[in-house]
Each structure stands twice: as C-alpha cells, then as structure tokens.
Image (cartoon, rainbow, N blue to C red):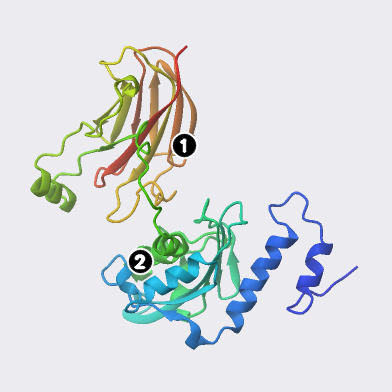
Amino acid sequence: MRQVLDSKTIREALPKLSWAGTDWNPEELSKLVDLASWAIQLPQDQLVNLAEPDGDAPTFTQDLFPDKSLGEVRMRFEKGERIALRIPLKVMRILPQAETQKTYFEVFLERDPSLSRGSDHYVRQGITITGISRLRDKKVRGIVVVKDKPLSSLLGDAETPAHTDWQERSSKIRDRYTKGASRVRFVRNSLRDLVAHLSQPAKGMDKDLLRDVFYLNLPAHEGTETTKKESDKKGPVSPVPTIQLPPARRRLRVEPVKGGFCVSKDPKSTERPRAVRVEVAYEVRRGNPFSRYDPLDFDLSKSPIGISAKCAKVTKAQNNILEFRVVDDNFAVTVKGFDVRRDIKIRAEQMGEQP
C-alpha cells in the first residue's frame, strides 16, 4: 500500500506506522512535526535577532541578545514556550575568490520535560544532517535551519559524503575559507550553547558536588596566552589540586606527563579504590569544559591518544571517558597524545572501594 506523506497527511500517518527497533515513537514525532510546522509558518519579524559575534572564533555570549531581551527569552524558555532566533555570521572565502559574505542561520527550540534525552536536528538546504547530537541529556527539542547560500556552501564543504556530520577539519574548509573551522563549530554547537545560556542556574548550593571529584590543570605550552594570564594572576601554576577532599577519600594522584597525564594511588592513602573513572577535556575560555567536549578534539580510543596501564585493567576508553579496575596498590595508568598547545582539564573519581 502506497501512501503520500505531506503536511496534511503526516500527522494522521504517524500512529499507523511501525517504529519498532527505532528510537522514535508517534508522540515524539508528532511534537517534532508541530515544532517544524510552527517554524516554517513563523513570520520573520517574530524571530529574535541576535547580534553578530565578534572575533575570529565566534561564541555565544549574553551580549548577543538585544538589550534586556535575554531575561524575557529565558523566562519563555523555562515555561516551555517556543523560541525562534536568527543568528548573523560572516563567512570569509579564499577560493574561488577572496571575499567576506554576510550570512545567517535560524534556531527553533522548546523545553519539554517529557523528553528522556535531547532531540536536536540540523537541516541545510532541506538536507537533514543525521549524525550530530549535541543536546544529549538536555530535555530540549531543537532545530537548526541553514538556508542562506554563503553559510550553506561552507557547511556543504564541511559535510561528510553521507550527509551525517559537519567536520570542521575538512580539507575543503581549510583550503577554501579563512577561519572556516570556527564557523562550522559555532553552528554545530549552537543548540547546546544556546540552551546553556537560556537555562536558569540551579538555586542553592550543592555542598557535596565536589566530594569525590578533583580537577587538575596541566601546564599550558610555554609562551601561550593562558600560561601568561595564570602566572600574572596566581603566580606559578601548581600541578597539585587545591580542592580539599575528606582524608578517607583522597586516594588518587594525578600528575602531568609530556603530552598527557598519569593516574596513580596517593602515597599518603592507606586504601585504594576498586575502580576509577576519569573524564578529560580541553580547557575552554567560557563554560564547563566537560560539557563542551567535542569528539573532534580527541577520542581516547583512537590515535594519537595512547593508554598504558600498570597493575590496572582498562574497562572503557571512549570519547573523553576512561574507566579502569585497580589490581594492585602500585597501579599507574598513563594517557598521552594530547595537543601540547592546549590546556587539559581532568576529573577523576573512584567508583568503588577495595573490600
């Protein structure tokens, strides 16, 4: 039986189709269709026009929102109302000729507590880019729409052959554009970064937030801006975490090594953890580096990252997460291969106690 799906028939057809073996269900698809229909029919003057980001590497900041509008948009978002934004951008081509082109893209999103995970979708000139998932555990449904030619051409050059992702390290991006990678990254991360700005901060203080967690800043490459700023503000960067942990829980030591770090037992501890979980990310200028981790930065399961384990067994090494079981007090797990020009942020926690 053949059935034509269009704007008039799609809602009626959704419950009749089998979604077994997929992550979809008729209710969620119906809500996505509703958001898309609303976005298509929304007059242009109903979109909130953001300011163009400054600098070579555009990022979302509060200053991009019109005067006093961020509070109103944030309130609407928290209430579950739909939000429509228009974000201007500049694309600087090198080939076929050097020129700077003004462009833009649009974002439509809504908060939905019934979602089990984020539902984000990216559309370029009618093509859905299926492999991008940036919202993860955020209970938000969002659509990024790119239809203006300059930005569409740039993202088309960044697209994989199967139209599943936008890759900022594409050779076409490198050869045809100035600062093209930062434009790809800005659009690709737009939903995630906007949700971070629109979400109200949690009220109160979580006194146990850092109970089992500590961070370590590895020294930056000599002469970089980060090293200079940290030295000016705080003196020499110390390789020892300053966060105080309860003595019974201070069982891990993280030390910098060339191109990475090493996790071992704290020599002052008389006990050892049964298992350890380590999360790694490159430092960022704004926001939480762990939530802003991008698989394009590095993947612990892939070259050039290398992991060596002494008296420990690695049970997981994927994206920016490393987990291992401890076999002996003399355990040491070393991870190398990171970009020495960037700072590393490390979060290590014990997953169990040795009986």
Q: Is residue 9 above or below residue 353?
A: below
- The residue at which mark 1 appears reads as 301
Q: Amino acid at mark 1?
A: Ser
Q: Position of residue 183 (x, y in %)?
A: 38, 67
* Front tag of 1 and 2: 2
Q: Residue at x 36, y 67 (%)?
A: 180
The numbered mark, 1 or 2, whose residue comes first in the sequence reads: 2
Q: Residue at x 38, y 71 (%)?
A: 71
Which residue lies at the image location 27% right of the left edge and 67% below the top edge? 56
Point out residue 122 in the picture as x, y percentages from the top left corner.
54, 66
Q: Look at the numbered disc 2 and give the secondary structure of its residue.
A: loop
Hey, what amino acid is under mark 2? Phe
Give whichever of 291, 316 is nearer the camera: 291
Which residue: 30% across, 72% down? 63
Q: Nearer the viewer, residue 68 or 339?
A: 68
Q: Nearer the viewer, residue 324 or 68?
A: 68
Q: Residues within 10 Å of mark 1 (few under 14, many from 20)?
A: some
**SS at mark 1?**
loop
Depicted 15 relative to depicted 320: above or below? below
Q: In the image, residue 275 lies at what x, y percent?
A: 45, 23
Q: Nearer the viewer, residue 198 or 339?
A: 198
**Occupied quadrant, residue 251:** top left
Going by the picture, which residue comes out furthest to the right?
1
Q: Quadrant of the N terminus?
A: bottom right
Where on the picture, by quarter, is residue 90?
bottom left
**Which residue does the numbered mark 2 point to in the structure image?**
60
- Residue 323 screen position, x and y as percent: 46, 29
Please give left or right for residue 74 compared with residue 6 in the image: left
- Residue 60 vs 328, above or below: the answer is below
